[in-house]
Structures are given as structure tokens and as C-alpha cells.
Amino acid sequence: MVRSTSPGQLPRHSRAVRAHLAPVVALLCFALLLAACAAPPPSVAITGDAVRVDNPSSRPAGASQNGAAYFTIVNPTDEDDRLLSASSGIANFTELHESSNDGGVIRMTHHADGVAVPAHSILSFAPGGHHVMLMNLHQALRPGQTFTLTLTFAKAGEIGLDVPVNAQP
Ligand SMILES: [Cu+2]
């Protein structure tokens, strides 16, 4: 079992800090979105008999800045699952976010209650859409480095990822 801090376990004073940072986070997410390239995700098939996470990737970011992590969740089972949270030791907060383009206005959603992963489905976390936001990085993320990210699912439990930092995720 991997034990690490999730947003729900933060002390009260940290919540106040996070609220204060929220506008900054939205701006940085917007910058990340603009920098995104429109390359389609690598092809992934709904095969196997358990929930899995393919193609983890991240992009370079400086210490104290925000980073983002991307991956593809595959649920080949007959049961709906739910990604509840993500956690990593490299950032102060690790949240499930979603960017969307609403008539030319970029909106950011923080999925505090998690993200549904229906039976027999593929859910992509990719630039311009769902992403894991790594807020206030403890260290710089440079191309070629790898960090650990843990995803917690309602049914599949914890899945640990080794996320490589790529110049172009
Ligand atoms: Cu974000």
C-alpha cells in the first residue's frame, strides 16, 4: 500500500492557502492548455480483466510552479469504477482537474468528488481536457526525469505510476 497525502487529509490551514492560490492555478492551467498540441493519444485497446493506466506522461515545469500529469485509464471490466484522487510527494497539492472550451471561454473544473470510469471504457487525461494538477512543485520537472504518482480508484484501489517528464507530452 502506498500512503501519501491527499487533499482530503490536509490540515485546515493548508485549505486556506489553497483557496488563496486558486486564481493563480487557473491562470497557469490556462497557459498549459494554450501550450498543448493537438496530437491524438496513442491507441489503447479495451483489453484485459482489470482497470489499468497506460501511457503516463508529464511536461517540464520549474520548482514552485505547477505541473500536469496525463495518462489513459482503461476499464475493461463489467463494473463502473471511479478515480477518486491522485497523490504525489513532489507537489503540495495534487488535484483532478478538467479544462473545457465553452464557446471560446476556457473553463477549469476541480473534480473534488473524482471522475467516473464507466465499464468497458477508455478515459484519457490529456492536454486540453482531464489532467492531474501538481500544484506548487517541491522540485523542478526536467525532461528525462520520472516521478511517482498514485491514483486511487473506488474499486480498483491504488495504482502507482512512474510518470516520465517529456518535452512534448
Ligand atoms: Cu489544472
Image (cartoon, helix red, strand yellow):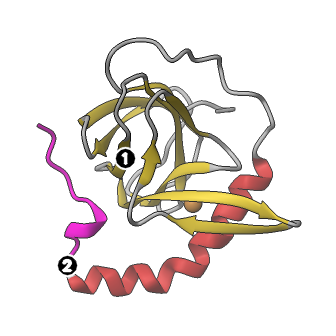
Magenta range is: 1-10
The amino acid sitting under disc 1 is Arg
Q: Residue furthest left?
A: 1
As drawn, is 153 to the left or to the right of 61?
A: left
From the Cβ of disc 2, is ligand 1 less than 8 Å away?
A: no
Which residue carries the number 2 mark? 11
Q: Secondary structure at mark 2?
A: loop
**Residue at 64% over, 16% down:** 43
Judged from the image, the secondary structure of the residue bearing numbered disc 1 is strand
Amino acid type at circle 2 is Pro
The residue depicted at 60 percent of the width and 76 percent of the height is: 24
Residue 123 coordinates in the image, percent (x, y):
54, 36
Quadrant of image for the C terminus: top right
Q: Is residue 73 above or below residue 20?
A: above
Q: Nearer the viewer, residue 25 or 53?
A: 53
- First in sequence: mark 2 vs mark 1: 2
Residue 8 appears in view: yes
Residue 151 position by quadrant: top left
Residue under the point 19% across and 78% down:
11
Tag nearer the camera, 2 or 1: 1
Residue 53 image point, x, y percent: 42, 28
Q: Position of residue 87 (x, y in %)?
A: 31, 51
Crowd tier of the residue under label 2, counting other residues whose Cα lies within 10 Å: few below 14, some 14–19, many 20 or above: few
Q: Quadrant of the N terminus?
A: top left
Q: Which quarter of the rendered image does ligand 1 occupy?
A: bottom right
Question: At 59% from the left edge and 57% from the top edge, which residue is drawn?
Answer: 98
Query: How far apart are the two marked residues, 2 and 1, measured between alpha carbons?
Result: 25 Å
Q: For mark 1, what is the residue?
A: 82
Asked if one can make out residue 56 in the rendered structure from this viewpoint, the answer is: no
Majority secondary structure of the magenta segment?
A: loop
